[in-house]
Structure formats: C-alpha cells, structure tokens
Image (spheres, helix red, strand yellow):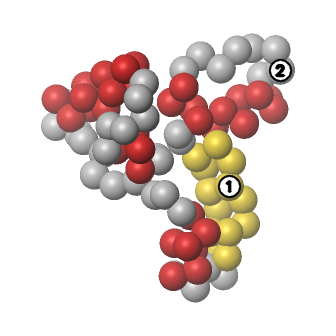
Amino acid sequence: MAEAVVSNTTGDQGITTLVESFASMGAPWLSGIRDIESLARDQRLSLIEDFQTAELHRTYWHGRPVASPIFSFYSVCTLGH
C-alpha cells in the first residue's frame, strides 16, 4: 500500500473513509512503501515486477472503468535474489 494511503494524505475522501473504516475495526494499516526500489536495494534484493493494481485492471479488464482511485495506490511487487 502506498504511504499516502496509510498517512491519509491522498486527498481522496473515499480512500480516507476506507482507511478510517479499517482502523475502526482494529485493523489499521501501519506502514506503506514510498520507494520499493530503495527497499529492495537495502535488502539486497532485485525488483522483478512492480504493478499498480490500476495498471493490472486496465490490462486484464479492457474497457471497464477503474472503480476506485485506491487502485493507483496499491501495488503488487515481486522481489528476488
């Protein structure tokens, strides 16, 4: 999850509501990652893949609108040796 989501700084009210709803259930996001490449380098790993879920949505669900801005703040990454 992007750091902007965790810190409630996206400027999107829907995302803020989502983050607050998780926190109210006792399941807050505690950390986000601003720079996955630096994290990989610090851990002596290589970044193999890094996709925003919005990008995956556009690739595999052609023509369907991205339903929420949260997809631009959520990524799926693969790190390796």
Q: Nearer the viewer, residue 49 or 69?
A: 69
- Residue 46 at what x, y percent from top left? 67, 76
For the C terminus, which image quadrant? Answer: bottom right
Can residue 18 be seen?
no
Q: Which mark is residue 50?
A: 1
Q: Nearer the viewer, residue 63 or 69?
A: 69
Total labels drawn: 2
Question: Which residue lies at the image location 31% right of the left edge and 44% below the top edge?
Answer: 7
* Left or right of 47, for residue 14: left
Q: Residue 62, labelled with which disc? A: 2
Secondary element type, mark 1: strand
Query: Pointers 1 and 2 in contact (CB under 8 A)?
Result: no
Where does residue 62 sit, x and y in percent of width and height? Answer: 83, 20
Circle 2 crowding by C-alpha within 10 Å: few under 14, some 14–19, many from 20? few
Circle 1 crowding by C-alpha within 10 Å: few under 14, some 14–19, many from 20? few
* Residue at left offset 54%, top offset 63%: 35
Which amino acid type corresponds to the residue marked 1 in the rendered image? Asp
Q: Amino acid at mark 2?
A: His
> Which circle marks residue 35 in the picture?
none
Residue 64 lies left or right of residue 42; in this view the side is: right
Q: Residue at x 82, y 14 (%)?
A: 63
Helix, strand or loop under label 2: loop
Q: CA distance from mark 1 to mark 2?
A: 20 Å
Residue 56 on image: x %, y %: 72, 36
Occupied quadrant, residue 57: top right
Q: Nearer the viewer, residue 79 or 17?
A: 17
Residue 9 location, quadrant: top left
Which residue is located at x 31 percent, y 22 percent? Answer: 17
| First reached walking from the N terminus: tag 1 or tag 2 | 1
Query: Percent position (x, y) of residue 45?
Result: 61, 79
